[in-house]
Image (cartoon, rainbow, N blue to C red):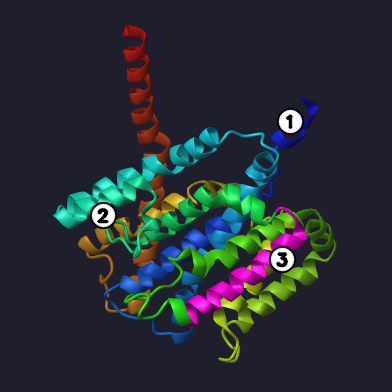
Amino acid sequence: MRYKMNFAKRENYKSLDGLRAYSAIGIAMMHFLANIKCGPLSWNPANGIIEFFTNYVYLFFMVSAFSMCCGYYERVKNGLVSMNEFYAKRYKRIWPYFAFLCLIGLAFNHTIGGVWQTFADLTLCFNLLPNPDIQIIGVGWFLGLVFLFYIMFPFFTFLINSKKRAWFVLTVAIAFHFIGRFYFFKEPFVDFEVGRHNMVFSMPYFLVGGIIYLYRRELKTVGGQFHRLLFLICMVASIFEFFKPEYIDEFMYLIILFGLWMIYAISGEWKWLSNKVVKYLSGISMEIYLSHMVLFRLTEKMGLDHITENPDLNYIMATVVTLAMTIGFCHVVKYKFLPKVMGCIKNKKINEDSIC
């Protein structure tokens, strides 16, 4: 019994809340800029910085892998959780909100193709399709890839069973990534662009998150002692991203950059990464990511994306209004509407069982 209790307590790294929250907001800002009718901002460097925010999905992958390891690595490895319980929790956490968004998307795209795409989305297994780029919820590909990672997690636990094996698997995964980019992700194997939607392409980020978990105690100790230096290195590496030579591969550099920020986040509780506002936004970060474009289309309908002749002011106004609406929407749906719906369904099932 004591052995089981040792693994029951989940480790908590509160500064990861900041990485989730800022990543979700950053990705939303990038999508707003890419879709707004007023065009690019007047200050060109700002366009480049905001466009870079699209890469925060990779940081999400790292955080997802690390967080899953905190909650389940030891329990899966030692057989302390049933697979039925593990997968049921994954569906219960993700499916209701995503299903609600899919139905909204279907209402605006009620074609036969929209029906098939919605069906695929509702399985949460659509990343198993040859081309998982489904447009009902355009940003939903991310959830499909993360859910595929959940499906693979017991195997992932095997892959990082030891530090030595984890480094070997990461080396193989990086090699597979480049072989895919230069050989398998082209004709005659595929006739569409294969990128981060694909698990072979993105797997190194999940593995880095797992490896950071394996070294979490050592990294927390060293990072805590030299946190100012570590923060400075993270900042310099972030700035260098915009000035690095073209021969430096972007994919590999982002592994290093986001790996450094992960190490900094787990090395202590930093106020700008761990506070009440950030914790709240982190709790709905996935929902913000999934629904921000739905609310942006509403902003467009209201004409708030081109209310003035100043593109910078239009972008700021549209971003602030859309983010406010998105956060409100996420809060109401996740914490008010869906719990009532799920509660009604649960009560109905209990009543039916009692009658039987």
Our reading of the magenta stretch's main secondary structure is helix
Q: Give the residue type at disc 3.
A: Trp
Foreground label between 3 and 1: 3
Q: Which residues are magenta?
A: 161-182
Write the residue at 65% across / 56% down.
159
**Residue 121 at x, y percent in the picture:** 32, 51
Callout 2: SS: helix
Q: Position of residue 253 (x, y in %)?
A: 61, 78
In the rendered structure, the answer to whether residue 243 lies left or right of residue 217 reads left
**Residue most toward the left?**
111
Residue at (79, 57) in percent of width and height: 220
In the rendered structure, the answer to whether residue 55 lies left or right of residue 217 reads: left
Q: Amino acid at mark 1?
A: Lys
Q: Which residue is mark 1?
A: 4
Mark 2–mark 3 Cα distance, whole angstroms, equals: 38 Å
Q: Which residue is mark 3?
A: 167
Of mark 2 and mark 3, the one earlier in the sequence is: 2
Amino acid under disc 2: Gln
Q: Are marks 2 and 1 in contact (CB under 8 Å)?
A: no
Q: Residue at x 44, y 85 (%)?
A: 43
Q: Position of residue 260 (x, y in %)?
A: 69, 68
For marks 2 and 3, give the one nearer the viewer.
3
The residue located at (39%, 42%) in the rendering is 95
